[in-house]
Amino acid sequence: MILASKGTITQAGLIDVHGGAGGPEGTFFAPGGGGAGGIVHLFAPEITHTGTETLTAGAQGTGTAAITANPRGAGGSGGSSGGSPGVGAQITAANAITINAAPGAGHAFTSLLDPTALF
């Protein structure tokens, strides 16, 4: 999320750009990876920043049961904006689900400048 002003920004509330949860397991596929946290960037010559940002990553999709249907599919990767995406679960040769890497949190930035020429 970009918030830009050629004057002043006062951010005293909550900006929520958390990642979404991964999809659950299904008959044919393992759970998906959660989405990464987002990006917040404030551009203005003067910024008063007393608020907070929620930049957390989304949870891994749910499910740990054996996948018994054919064809079998691993879980899809989560989306990414600011952090690294969650990796979808794998299915072993024994049809068991193996959970992979969790997604990463996002990032917040401020730039003290007049953004007029940037956009």
Image (cartoon, rainbow, N blue to C red):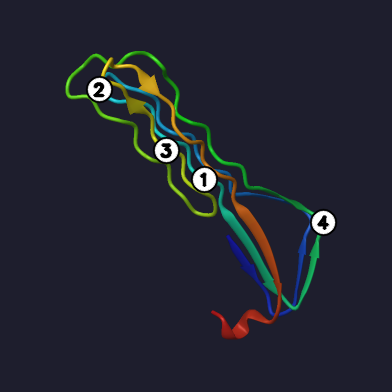
Tell us which disc is closer to us: 3 or 1. Answer: 3
Give me the C-alpha separation between circle 4 and circle 3: 34 Å
Q: Amino acid at mark 4?
A: Thr
Above or below 69: residue 76: below
- The residue tagged 2 is 28
Cα separation, mark 3 vs mark 1, equals 10 Å
Give residue 50's mark.
Answer: 4
- CA distance for labels 2 and 1: 25 Å
| Mark with earlier residue (2, 1) | 2
Counting from the top left corner in percent of width and height, residue 85 is at 46, 45
Residue projecting furthest to the left: 70
> Which residue is rendered at x = 30% and y = 30% of the image?
74
| Dot 3 or dot 2, earlier in sequence | 2
Residue at label 3? Answer: 87
Q: Earlier in the sequence, mark 1 or mark 4?
A: 1
Upstream in sequence: badge 2 or badge 4 = 2
Which one is nearer the viewer's eye here, 19 or 7?
A: 19
Residue drawn at (58%, 44%), measured in percent from left and top? Answer: 18
